[in-house]
Amino acid sequence: MPDHPFLKMSQIDKAFNGVEVLKDVSLEVEKGEIHALLGENGAGKSTLMNILGGVHQPDRGKIVIDDSEIDMTNPRVSQQHGIGFIHQELNVVSDLRVYENMFLGAELRNKFGFVNVEEMCNQARDILGKLGVDIDPKAYVRNLDTSYKQLIEISKALLHESKLIIMDEPTTALAEHEVDRLFTLMRNLKHSGVSIIYISHKLKEIKAICDRFTVLRDGEVAGVGNLKEEDLESITKLMVGKSVSEERFTQAQEFGDVLLEVQGLTNVGLFRNINFQVHKGEIVGFTGLAGDGRTELFETLFGYRKKYTGNITIHDRLIKMDHPQKALKAGIGLVPKNRKENAIIKDLNVIHNMSLSSMSHFERLGLIQEKVEKSKFQHYKKLLNIKVHNPNVPIDRLSGGNQQKVVIAKWLEVNTDILIFDNPTQGIDVGAKREIYEHIVSLANQGKGIIILSSEAPEILKVCHHINVMYQGEITARFNGKTATEDTIMSYATGSKREGETNAEYTTS
Amino acid sequence: MPSTQLHEPSPQQQSSTTMKDRLNWLWSEYSVIIAFLIIFIVASMMSPRFLDLTNQLNILMHVSIIGIISLGMTIIMLSGGIDLSVGSVLALVGVLTVMAMNASGSIIIGLLTACIVGAFAGFLNGILIAKGKIASFIATLGMMAGARSIALYTANGGSISSEVDGFSAISNSKLGMIHYPVIIFIIMTVLVFILMHKTRFGRYVYAIGSNEKAALLSGIRVDRVKIGVYSLAGLLVSAAAIIETSRLNSISSSSSGMQYELDAIAAVIIGGTRMTGGRGKIIGTFFGVLILGILNNMMNLMNVSTHLQGFVKGLIIIIAVVFQKRE
């Protein structure tokens, strides 16, 4: 290994309001290396990257790039030194076109000072072509899928010819084949001498793409090493301080009566002819690629989308779903995906977020009993291990995992018989993930019917009794959770294989 | 002060935070009260007459109408909307109330008419916004033009006076030293405070203003809550219209309620409510109303030209918002 790494951050200290977030952290990235930065939520990864990006200033320590020490006083300095930052949150403007987004703030102009649309489109097309994405640079971003928005962010960093790109969980919104494409591109970048710092919770991806890793735990470096020489188990152990295995969480068990039956459900353009049942105590998974219609299917089932044909029967009662409140009354709860947009009310505090769907439990003579709310929250805090010192702070002060637990607590308080979890572990660290799986399984053991939607096949395999695979709005295959494998699921999810409705029936073991 | 929507640091947290943090917190939570105190002190230094009890009560009397409207405006703005129609609806309510009262000879019939007209105008706004999915700015802009036009047409463009004895007593009587409108304003403030901070309706309004989709996915009947919000605000305009009409025992279809929407929005903004909804307090609006009242009073006492008063008001609104942005 050469003595002069491209980037060297050494002995970085950082504290916010007297709370130490980073303690004596060092990080070295070679030229043309893909370096994994690992750690649970709150371990200090984002802070460290924000220091590198010039967003925060370190209290102590120095940053050396290409042998010269640099004072990262603001994001511009960082950009000028070739550092590109792809944030976890998508910073795209939906009302602008693709190329306008890519060149935002750095528009090309012709000699008259007008924007040079043609040149920008050509460059945009080049870069999108490199990524293997087939979208028109002139298309409006609002008409594109979320995964494309992510790719636009990545293209933006490429456009600025960065020498080091920070990718903060770039694959959360991507389908598997898009992830593969991204990886190919990352390898190309690597060969052309660009370094990448890759932050992700998906250890398999990291194993596949990264060269070396640095693990942060509680603001300190817990380990540095070569990915080829370590197995996932030991890295996980470094991250959480204990071992988390890949075993299945569910056990085979007897199911009770049918809770939910869906027959011939169709919503034109989104999904068609969907049939399935959910029994008491059963965990049913739905997986597929982006655009498979599963989220829309369950938004319809939850009364958020009103136009549909087909029958929804709950507890043997046919129900016309036209409002979430009706679904809630009928016994369906939904923990939606994209927590920030769909699930949390960021101006309400943690307790009020918990009680929002079941206000009648906390009222006397029409007035809210805050004491009852508070004591109920303490109950869920203990039950779900929600880490919060002061539940009166706005919910967006909590980490992603704890926010998700509050959302789950909200639905536990409503106490519906059926619970739908859409991408329940999105942006959540390994430890909290495991806790959430355990809670889901224990809810099923208490006799609830559970539905899990996820684009991550391993997640579905870990917790579901039965798995439905969707492709372009249809259920293309059904599997028993015990016998299914990731490969077979993928082959149906990508549409390369499909079964008819009739022989797709699984046996309830 | 009891506050359910905003966080108060727990004792342990407070002890660990520095003096500067605590000052910051005090500022961001109660900046409107601090601003009120500063303006109050400055006013009392600039004009000796300002502190007279009669002058103080006079200020309260003057702000009570805008104050009651501002309470409704606060609820609407917390839900993420805005209501431009309050001034016109006030004129329409006044005209129809006087007509109903003159025709029937009964004050009770007049008051009932007022409540029905105001609440119905609000209800229409709510239907257009919640069911028709029209932006609140547009829907209430339409209502603003429409209500004023009907008021002008009904009253032939002029004023109409009440012919029923005793109606003017509503605004012109006192309990001890305090005018009835002031008492009504304060009672309304307390009721709206309880509604917004102690009932599920209030909780839902904050939730909708902060994140409408998440509120809907939490099983809240967003449409109904919104219709309720606008209807309630309309009802509060009814109360304001009764006071306005009773004060002079007449109402002008052309000039009554002119630009009340701007004063009400100004009071709400000065009070620290966020334009996009989800954040703000009834208490803030209460002090916002008082700040506007003191400014008007001070300029009158100091003989500032009425033509310049709008300039000063505009300046204060912008300064207030600039300071609140610092949080």
Image (tube, coloured by chain):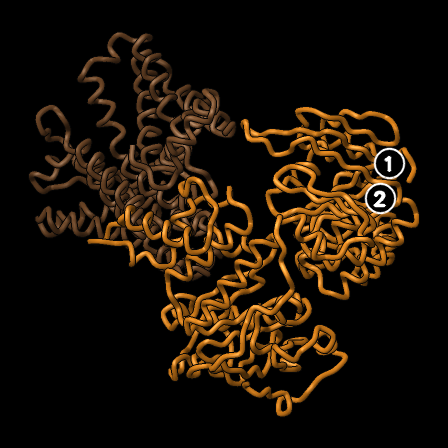
Chain colours: A orange, B brown
Q: Which residue is mark 2?
A: A195
Q: Please, is residue A34 above or below residue B7 in the view? A: below
In the picture, the quarter occupied by the N terminus of chain B is: top left
Residue at the spot 73% in from the left edge and 52% down from the top edge: A97
Q: Tell me if residue A140 can be seen.
A: no
Q: Please, is residue B174 above or below residue A471 in the view? A: above
Quarter of the image for residue A134 reads bottom right
Residue A341's x, y, as percent? 54, 53
Residue A187's x, y, as percent? 87, 54
Q: Which chain is mark 2 on?
A: A
Residue at the spot 37% in from the left edge and 38% down from the top edge: B261
Q: Please, is residue A85 above or below residue A97 in the view? A: above
Front residue (pair A417, B55): A417
Residue A300's x, y, as percent? 51, 71
Residue at the spot 54% in from the left edge and 27% down from the top edge: A18
Q: Residues within 10 Å of mark 2 (few under 14, many from 20)?
A: many
Q: Which residue is mark 1?
A: A6
Front residue (pair A258, B229): A258
Q: Amino acid at mark 2?
A: Ser
Q: Tell me if residue A506 can be seen.
A: yes
Q: Is residue B147 left or right of residue A266?
A: left
Q: Please, is residue B82 above or below residue B322 in the view? A: below
Marks 2 and 1, Cα distance to the nearest angstrom?
8 Å
Q: Secondary structure at mark 1?
A: loop
Residue at the spot 43% in from the left edge and 72% down from the top edge: A448
Residue A110's x, y, as percent? 87, 40
Q: Is residue B324 left or right of residue A63?
A: left
Q: Residues within 10 Å of mark 1 (few under 14, many from 20)?
A: many
